[in-house]
Amino acid sequence: MRVLIAGGGTGGHVFPGIALAEEVSTRHPKNDVIFVGTERGLEAKLVPSAGYKLEAIRVRGLKRVGFLRMLVALFALPLAFVESWRILRRHRPDVVVGVGGYSSGPVVLAAWMQGVPTAVQEQNALPGLTNRILGRFVRAVFIAFEEARRFFPERKVHLIGNPVRRKLLDNYLRSSMPHERFTVLVFGGSQGAKAINALVLQAIEHLCDLKGELHFVHQTGKSNVEAVRQGYQERGYSAEVLEFIEDMSAAYARAELVVCRAGATTLAEVTVCKKACILIPFPHATDDHQAVNASALVSAGAALMFREHEVDGKTLAEQIRQLKVDPGRLRRMEKMSGMLGRPEAAKELADVCVQMMIKSWGPHGRDRPDKKKKLEPQGSAKS
């Protein structure tokens, strides 16, 4: 089976795609996965480092940009569609899955027009505009939150959760790694968050009596790493400050508590890793979807949530203090978090992709040996 995964921009879109790619590629040695994204998004780094081929198209976002940039993006759309069409003709995928981001739209639409089975994977409780539109055309829609169901045709919807990378699944089966200090993992998404960086530095001013008992692992993003590192050093805290954490599996395993945004992929990871969280939703997320995402964890007793404009360093410090001194409460939150985890999401998504392939092309895919190749002059055998 050959699967083409379209989308990217942020880790929230890229990581579920990589999780699906891992599931597909490990099922059979002849299975193949290709990604389509842009050269500017996080996929340009993450996809090749994960060992998968990335094809780039020239497409730009239309949201939250100035008028001139919006015009440039609109004029680029026809070119992106042509590039997508050519990529699809060249690789002849059996199934195309859009994982969100502005590069997803032209690819999935071109695949639908070519008669290739298509699907979209919506990570959030409130779907973005691109996936709402594509949901009318694709054969399957994979959602992670029940709240998203109402935005798509019921017959197409599969509630499976968000796919999580294979390495992170180890955390679902093991206890936390042993460590000497109470470890707090801090990150604001794949690209960091200045507001969370500043908030945590304010919080540690109020935790000086616990300084020797705390350790921080902090992903800051590119622009803030040196300032945050210096902030911990000046206050005498034990901390690992990184622009980007490559091994999130180890980071989660060491953490007693996670302070983070409430992106859908982040929540999928923390629940699979069974972590208690303090969630600070991104205040400018479309339709406030991060707050909606977080509500499921809060309602289950797996997390605390604070609006960015409502929380200060003192409040955050008090929450960290309370959870540290009450391990029973922390364990209860971890248990509830684990009950929300969906470790089988990638497998279930891949199973539906196989069903779509078989329905359209037969058990060996669109280029099976017994099929006359009418659409294209070349292709390779699939399994």
Image (cartoon, grey):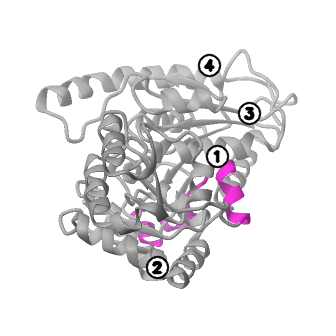
Q: Reading the chain from its start, which is encountered first: label 2 or label 4? A: 4
What is the quadrant of the C terminus in the image? top right
Q: Reading the chain from its start, which is encountered first: label 4 or label 3? A: 4
Residue 72 drawn at (x, y percent):
22, 23
**SS for tag 2?**
helix
- List the residue tagged with mark 4: 90
Can residue 31 be spotted in the picture?
yes
- List the residue tagged with mark 1: 20
- List the residue tagged with mark 3: 366
Label 4 – label 3 distance at C-alpha? 13 Å
Question: Which residue type carries mark 4?
Answer: Arg
Q: Quadrant of residue 88?
A: top right
Question: Which residue type carries mark 3?
Answer: Arg
Mark whose residue sits in front, 3 or 1: 1
As for residue 306 lying within the magenta part, the answer is no
What is the quadrant of the N terminus in the image? top right
Span colored in magenta: 146-174
Can residue 281 be spotted in the picture?
no
- List the residue tagged with mark 2: 325
Q: Reading the chain from its start, which is encountered first: label 3 or label 1? A: 1
